Amino acid sequence: MPEGHSIHRLARQFNDVFAGEKVAVSSPQGRFVDGAALLDGHTIISAFAHGKHLFVNFENDLTLNVHLGIYGAWTFGGDDQFNGASSIGAPRTIGEKERGTAEVSGEYQGAPEPKATVRTRIVSEHGWADLIGPTICRVLTPDEIRGVRAKLGPDPLNDDADPASFYRAASKTGRPIGVVLMDQKSISGVGNIFRAESLWRQKINPFRPAKELDASELEALWENNKHLLHIGVRVGRIITTEPDDRPGIPETEAWPEHANYVYMHHGEPCRRCGSIIRVEEVAGRKLYWCPGCQH
């Protein structure tokens, strides 16, 4: 499942290529016909992300809300005025390599014939976007948007995010902190890789009850995830290593060998303490950690 930085990149892409554009919206698959009809022929005003939810605002006070889930993906194409990633979401290789439209589309001939699996197609004068396989694809009113966001934890990438609600949620539960970090009702946008890497960076045992962490540890986890998510937005890949730990290797070239400390490094010695990194199944997801320095 794409982590929060990918959805913020999606929002940025929509703002770059669709904001201010009158668009045609359709549902080639047929599962979003009614929703598409509400948006078809209207102008996109702006897009934003909250955690793993994308919100695309239209001038008729309606909003397209998409959650990609495990299988969802957006694919883009267009002319030389329509720049950005060719695709974001699944299927993708770990690291989320994105290519500019010019690299994949060649001379623009208009939107291609849609695949039968396209849930939603958006077409402007200069390009198009196709959505396949989302967990959520719906049209919301402003009140409904507020309701959705009220159920989500704060997103470290949003300027108006209040980490106090994350601190409160963590301090009231005996669940492992490694589970709380993946709970989108506690903190939004943090996925499996950011979870493992931020806990390792702070030397926190992922199985510690969240309520046992003190205020400084919770604040450090928030700031660490915020720092790493911002790198993800900037680079388009999850790079969690610091420059001093990969001398001479810029963040844009760190993937995959120098990208992470513990994620997918199970069976290898921890670069900090030398203990063997473990992987364990927790709440249906693989958790990577070092039993030596995360005790």
Image (spheres, rainbow, N blue to C red):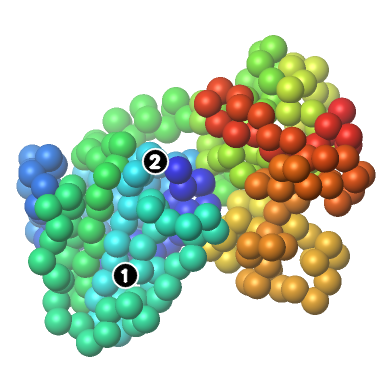
Residue 56 location (% of width, % of height) = 30, 51
Marks 1 and 2, the one that precedes in the sequence: 1
Decide if residue 293 is in sight here.
Answer: yes
Residue 59 location, quadrant:
bottom left
* Kind of element beneath mark 1: helix
Residue shown at 13%/61% (left/top)?
114
Vertical comparison of 77 with 157: above or below: below
Residue shown at 71%/48% (left/top)?
265
Quarter of the figure with the N terminus = top left
Residue 143 location, quadrant:
top left
Q: Residue furthest bottom?
A: 107
Q: Amino acid at mark 2?
A: Ile
Residue 76 location (% of width, % of height) = 29, 66
Quarter of the figure with the C terminus = top right
Mark count: 2
Q: Residue furthest front?
A: 267
In this figure, which residue is indicated by the disc labeled 1?
17
In this figure, which residue is indicated by the disc labeled 2?
70
Left or right: 109, with 279 as reference point:
left
Left or right: 216, with 230 as reference point:
right
Q: Which mark identifies residue 175?
A: none
Badge 2 crowding class, 10 Å Cα cut-off, few under 14, some 14 to 19, many 20 or more, is some
Residue shown at 47%/54% (left/top)?
6
